[in-house]
Amino acid sequence: MRLTKEESRLLRASEGEATRKAMKLLKGLGDFYGADSLIPVGSCQISGVSYKTGGEALLAVLEAFVEEGVKVSVPSYLNPAGMDLCEWGAMGICSEFASKQKTIISLYKKMGIKALCSCTPYNVVKPPRAGEHVAWGESSAVAYCNSVLGARTNREGALSALASAIVGKTPNYGLHLAKNRAPTHRFEVRFEMEELDFPILGKHIGREVKGGIPFISGITEARPWQLKALGAAMAATGSVAMFHVEGLTPEAGQRQYSNARCKRVSLGPADIKSIRASERTKTDADLVVFGCPHCDIEELEAIARMLKGRKVARGLKLWVFVPRPLLSRPKAKAAAKAITKAGGFVFCDTCCVVSPLEDMGFKGVITNSGKASVYLKNLSGTPPVLASTVECIEYCTRKG
Ligand code: F3S
């Protein structure tokens, strides 16, 4: 990978050891993947925030970075942490975990990174423009960024995203190049999509294409949160970082993509019936979870509407995860209030996967999230159940 004079200078430590290490990492990545150069990024989204997943090693690395005076040079935001930074007590988080998690957040802040603690930054800060290069880490955010926003990012690791945040650049390879954004598989949907089909279909397609790029036709309409759910599920069962939906995502209409020759699969009513059936299992779950990825206003309002006149049943918990800045908007605030009034909890800064749920004694989970239903497999008790938003609400208020 060619470096400019300025980039070579950074590699010689004239700007400090931390910047030199960040440049070295980006140069190594670029050389490995055959990038021709580094390109500027508009923003970085950094995963590796939860004390549950990072532990003492994360704390030690961040302390060393801060000691070295590491600062980011482009707008950078954090992925969810291991707890709601204000209401951690209501989640059942112990004070030792809370103290460690708060230290991690304060160290990131010292580097100039915004503690957005959300996997849907595009819903609460200015989203990247179509064609803009960014370095994002969380898999559902990456899929949404490439597919729905039309911006360009690879699926970055915590360290590579941080290195990009310090240097302000990323190696030009993978999904930053138009030629790598073409579909590898085509799926023709020949049935009427219901709400739950977005995560269900996402899980199915992710398993089929693994790291490929699916092109889906036959979905006539979808709200942004439905595309978010579709992409999050594909990224969870496969490692899908980009997808096209004919007529709905910005690059699906490009002739070289819509005509791309690749494996074709047709999915009819009988296929979806058997895929749906595979998700239907009995449960004695005591936790109902929404907000993986974090809810937008439309989802939050829908949950509040469905809860009207109902109460969360004794012995059950309803948790809804949102990005904190969303709650400063009057509509979201009103919906959150209604959810709380019905006995639910609206938590920020965290999610059901990166918080230490397995230590909280829950028997099982019901969720409308395809991604959560994959990642919560290791929770003790019954396996997670994927159900529609209405079914989840009915389940948690059934005795109310
Ligand atoms: Fe987001 Fe956590 Fe789900 S980071 S996509 S809410 S696993």
Image: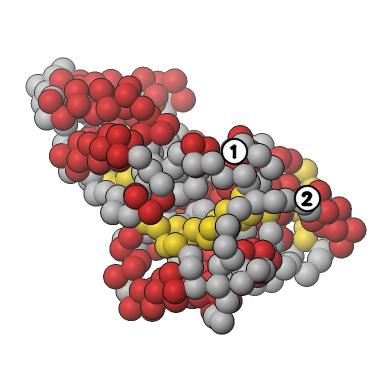
Q: Position of residue 177 (x, y in %)?
A: 47, 41
Res. 399 image quadrant: bottom right
Q: Give 221 or 299, whichever is nearer the viewer.
A: 299
Q: Dot 1: within a 10 Å radius of its alpha carbon, few (fewer than 14), some, or many (20 or more) residues?
A: many
User: Quarter of the image holding residue 346?
Assistant: bottom left
Compared to residue 196, the image places residue 61 above or below, namely above
The answer to whether 57 is drawn above or below residue 244 in the figure is: above
Classify mark 1 as within 8 Å of ligand 1 or not, answering yes or no.
Answer: no
Q: Amino acid at mark 2?
A: Thr
Q: Position of residue 191 (x, y in %)?
A: 81, 66
Q: Is residue 345 visible?
A: yes
In-front residue for pair 58/258: 58
Reading the image, the residue beneath label 1 is 379
Q: Is tag 2's residue or tag 1's residue first in the polypeptide sequence? A: 2
Q: How many marks?
A: 2
> What is the number of the mark on residue 281?
2
**Three-letter amino acid code of the residue under disc 1:** Leu
Q: Position of residue 400 (x, y in %)?
A: 61, 72
Query: In the structure shown, which secondary structural element does the residue marked by tag 1 occupy?
Result: loop
